[in-house]
Amino acid sequence: MIGATGQTGRVAVRALAEDGWEVRAASRGGGRDEHWPEDVRTVRLDREDDAALASVIGDGCDVVVDMVAFGRTHARQLTALAGRISSAVVISSGAVYEDDRGRGFDTQNEPDGGPRYPVPIPETQRTVAPGETTYSTRKVLLERELLAAGDAPPVTLLRAGAIHGPYCRTPRELYFVKRLLDGRRRRVLAYGGRSRFHPVHVANLAELIRLAAARPGSRVLNAGDPQAPTVAEIGAEIDKVLDRETETVLIDGAPEDGVGDTPWSLEHPVIYDMAAAERELGYRPVTDYAESLPGTVAWLTERLRGRDWADAFPKMVRNYGRDGLFDYAAEDAWLARHDRTAG
């Protein structure tokens, strides 16, 4: 397992070990999770060091699970070890898709750039062009390199939705949790609160990894939860977990000067078709969004305790900016104008 101590790796290591695999858990720090069985072996690994990766693989292994592969370089690292790897499971992303007009995640900030995907999106939907310029294009390049290599081991590529659960470096749920902890009792949601961005809990992604490891094959599969709740439904569920009441004010269209924008806010739904995973792997989700939410909220609440949110989640700041998600002054000004108009 490459990237074993990340958000999904922690759960996937445990799932594989409990399924009877002998697991070598590789990470930059070489650490271990307290919930792993004692026989899980840990090892330090700098993923960018080809020789170090080859040393970890040693004389060979039945399956490599790669949580942190991006682009051509990482694909070629794996294919170079083809003679010592029987199969692989590699995490890709649902961000690889583009619609029939060439719009995708990379065009969302352009005029009329929001993609309109089929609902749900099958694995046969076209993808963005491969390249090294963005997250999406690098994932497509990774996929094509791995699937095109004639001597490569069978590889299952899992196109993950919006991953959620404890230990996330960019937890979308922070948007609602922090507001409630800060005593906010009103929130504004764009697009009428109808935005749907298909999530996948780490336990469901780990289950897909477990199943794919036991059934080697060359394929691309979506990875998602059994439901894709709207952003308004997510906010309401988090209210329930924290036992708070919140008034939701809706903007029918796009965010206004950033107000109403959330990490889920999309004009059109992004929902992944899970039929292929069910058919090819026998996949059945082990949890759903609402059922898994208390664990995520408890972890977020504890991590925020006594800390500035920017110190607790620095990658969140890099992605959204310090005021991008929590500009309460702008939100209050918008609500005041809204109340005057409504009155």
Image (spheres, helix red, strand yellow):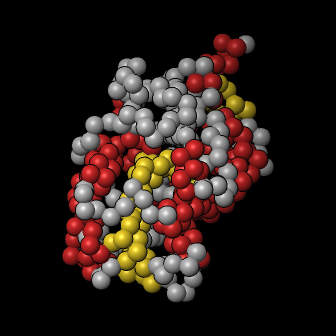
Image quarter where the C terminus lies is: top right
Counting from the top left corner in percent of width and height, residue 187 is at 65, 34
For residue 58, what is the image quadrant? bottom left
Front one among 122 and 160? 122
Q: Residue drawn 42% across and 59% down?
A: 217
Q: Is residue 138 visible?
A: no
Front one among 273 and 172? 273
Image quarter where the N terminus lies is: bottom left
Q: Residue drawn 43% across and 76% down?
A: 25
- Measured along the vertical axis of the image, is residue 259 above or below residue 112? below
Counting from the top left corner in percent of width and height, residue 72 is at 23, 54
Q: Residue drawn 21% across and 76% down?
A: 51
Q: Total of numbered circles in the picture? A: 0
Q: Is residue 11 visible?
A: yes
Counting from the top left corner in percent of width and height, residue 295 is at 67, 60
**Seen in the image, is 296 located left or right of residue 5?**
right
Front one among 124 and 98? 124
- Measured along the vertical axis of the image, is residue 79 above or below residue 235? below
Query: Which residue is farthest bottom?
Result: 39
Q: Residue drawn 25% across and 56% down?
A: 149
For residue 26, what is the image quadrant? bottom left
- Measured along the vertical axis of the image, is residue 92 above or below residue 84? above
- Measured along the vertical axis of the image, is residue 102 above or below residue 309? above
Counting from the top left corner in percent of width and height, residue 102 is at 34, 26
Front one among 23 and 81? 81
